[in-house]
Amino acid sequence: MICTMQPLNRLAIALAAALAAHGLMAQAQDYAPPGYAQGAPDGSVLGNPDALAPNGQYADPSSRIATLTDAAGGISFAPAGSDEWAAIGLNRPVTTGDRLWVDPGGRAEVHAGTTTVRLGGGTAASILNLDDDTTQVKLTQGSLQLRVRALPQGQQVEVDTPNLAFVPNEPGDYRIDVSPDGSTTLVSMRHGSAVVYGDSRSVELSRGQRMRFAGTDLADAGAGAYPPPDGFDQWTAARDAREDQSVAARYVPREMTGYAALDDYGDWQQDAGYGAVWFPRAVPSGWAPYSTGHWAWVAPWGWTWIDDAPWGFAPSHYGRWSHFGNRWGWVPGPASVRPYYAPAVVGFIGGSAATIRIGGGPGVAWYPLGPRDVYRPGYRASQNYVSRINYAPIHHYGRGGDGRDRDRERWVNRNVPGAITGMPSRNFVEGRPVPRGSHHDAWRTLPVGEGRGAPPMAPVKRSYIGEAPTRALPPMARQGFERQAIATHLPGRPAFDDRRPWRPPSQQAGQADRGDRGDRGGPGGQGGQGRPDVRLTEAALAARHRGGDPSRDGAPRGFVNPVQGGAQRPDDNPRDNGRNWSTRPDQMRGVPPEAQRQQQAVQRQQFEQQRQLGEQQRQSADFQQRQQQALQNQRQEQQRQLQEQQRQGQDLQRRQQYDQQRMAQEQQRQLQDQQREATQRRQFDQQRAQQEQQRQQQDQQREAMQRHQFDQQRAQQEQQRQQQDQQRQQRQQFEQQRAQQEQQRQQMEHQRAAQEQQRQQMEHQRQAAQQQRQAQEQQRAQQDQQRQQMEQQRQAQQQRQAQDQQQRAQQQQQQQQERQRQFQQQQQQQQQRGQNEPGDRGGHGNRGAMQARNDDRR
């Protein structure tokens, strides 16, 4: 019996180990979206139905994405597949097919992992390709600063302009300026080295070089007047220094997009179970993650959260959130693990949009996932992708315990008060901001709907730009976007989702398919704008024909003849077949000008014919290759189905054989048990006693080891606690010092206020004294005026008195004169009467004398 049970025990142990080893895969299978050949539960199709990998399965979305991390001035944005331009804000995801226009005087910073693209004023830029391995930007006018912090093997960074394709060879700092008319391109090599490609030749540039190119074949436009360092250079230097000194880079990998924005808005603390945790400093009361912002549709990920906080990109798309006491903390995970972008690390509750009623209609509610919660994409992805995007949370966020403990603690944030945020479904789909206070405790009692990675709702036209104001693109910008650029690689196909109920006008009008240009609204196209207009360089084609990569192969030595398959030089001069070969006329020595022109015309005609023939052959080869690939995929699918049928038949046979063998072994075991029951019972008891002793010894050893491990863990915890106490003491000391400084500052403020009051009082007193002195001066002046007036009045009275006296004297004189005159008249009259009356002379004379005396008395 023992011998027959041991193989079964080993088999059980092996099965248990396999299940434990594949626990994450089992969880991923439980949480993954429906199979590739089927749609979502509501019948819709998720993700990009045209994004097929070489094996015939759906390709996983990129783990890298870009976002706008700094902006100033007017910036316009057109998402892939749309000709409608709108204003763009911070934290908006930027991916393949998106276009940006920066108004004159503005600037913008686009961060994509270890690559940063900064745009100056009057700049037109398009994202040609942005995936796990490639960052390709089209610059048709304006200024661009390219900061490449890391360039691992297999990574490709490229900037395509109307004059050249710029490909860095190593990390560095580069600036590219394209004239407003697109006629010249100025390349400034601040740090690093690169290769620039023209139509048929290439040039290597190193640190410190600065060259201006014209045309499409790297013609030297001359040094000219290079502009001096401007405000754009100062801004880019300041942003580079800020990124170099980032504190967040100590706790998160630099491949995480938007990490540098965390430095100014939060603090880091160490947690015993989660490691580094970031806490935002200033958030309103009752705030919860994913509660201030809006939702937008970004293919192929679908519904994507755009946070309003300037620091909100990295905590919204990487890591997990956890509730510590009365505040939320962001747990990014270990810095050594490569980050994988997610559109929103949340769980939607309720199972479907019709379960929740908000504002009298259907609603949507969500909450942040915790450190132990598995994120389940709502878009198409492979099991490997689901495992990688959940690797850090599952393997690095545990505080101990078995899987059952983790299952019991899953979705813990769902029960945190205020963690669930909701809004009406219509507002959700139209990209409207989440209203404040959109929390309701009753939503915690809704059915568990975490199995659905996203709400089953299709986007509408407003889902792509939300409530951002539309903007009219200037004519100069539209001309810039229509220019053709030189490239070493074809642009990537923008993601497309056939759940769109809305189509751009060009697609609604039934625009015809244009092959590789992708000018259509179907899978792989961009709707109204089509694939960007680029032209592959012959130098890149030559490098590929030799089996090399133009981004790593350096400058080619010629271009490839697609017909003959060999290196073909434009002329027969062997010394021009070098690293810096050129077709400029001034390099053709000893040939007359007319012969030069004829030779160049013939060469151009031959080159064009060869290029057209090579293009036709390449298209034919590509078509045949696609047909062969489709046939091969069909054969592989048929072989896989046949192998699956064979495997199922073999499994059935193996199970039948196993059942028969097990029944035969069971019969043999019963017979052997009956035959050896009497003779082997004692041996069995002895063996059982020995096994019991061994088990007890093993238990004792296991208990000793566990006790030792427990003691070690307790010692470690004690050390951690002591460290935490020390940190707490340091923090308390720091708080005390800060409080003392605050008290000193307040005392100084009080002293300053008292001094200010004293100064004001003295000023008031001085003003009062001044007013009194002025009043006294006014009184003295009034008194002086009064004295002067009195003196004048007295003088006037004296004058009047003198005049009166003079008048009286004059009157008296006049009276005396009048009396004298009257007296004389009387005397004359008396004399006349005396002459006329002699007899009466004496008597009359006496009377006259008496009358005269009386008059004198009067």
Image (spheres, grey):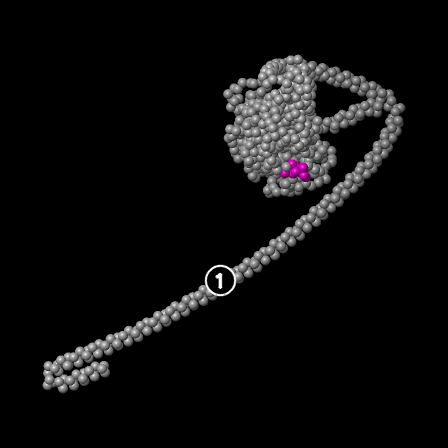
Q: Amino acid at mark 1?
A: Gln
Q: Quadrant of the C terminus?
A: bottom left
Please provide percent x and percent y for residue 46: 60, 24
Query: Is residue 100 left or right of 575 when viewed as pictured?
Result: left
Which region shows up in magenta?
238-248
Q: Quadrant of the N terminus?
A: top right
Please provide percent x and percent y for residue 362: 54, 31
Q: Is residue 156 magenta?
A: no
Q: In this figure, which residue is indicated by the disc labeled 1?
A: 771
Query: Is residue 467 left or right of 341 when viewed as pictured?
Result: left
Which is more toward the observer, 24 or 226?
226
Main SS category, magenta section: helix
Q: Is residue 243 magenta?
A: yes
Which is more toward the observer, 569 or 753?
569
Within 10 Å of the Cα at label 1, are there few (<14), some (14-19), or many (20+) other Cα atoms? few
Query: Is residue 16 left or right of 758 when viewed as pictured?
Result: right
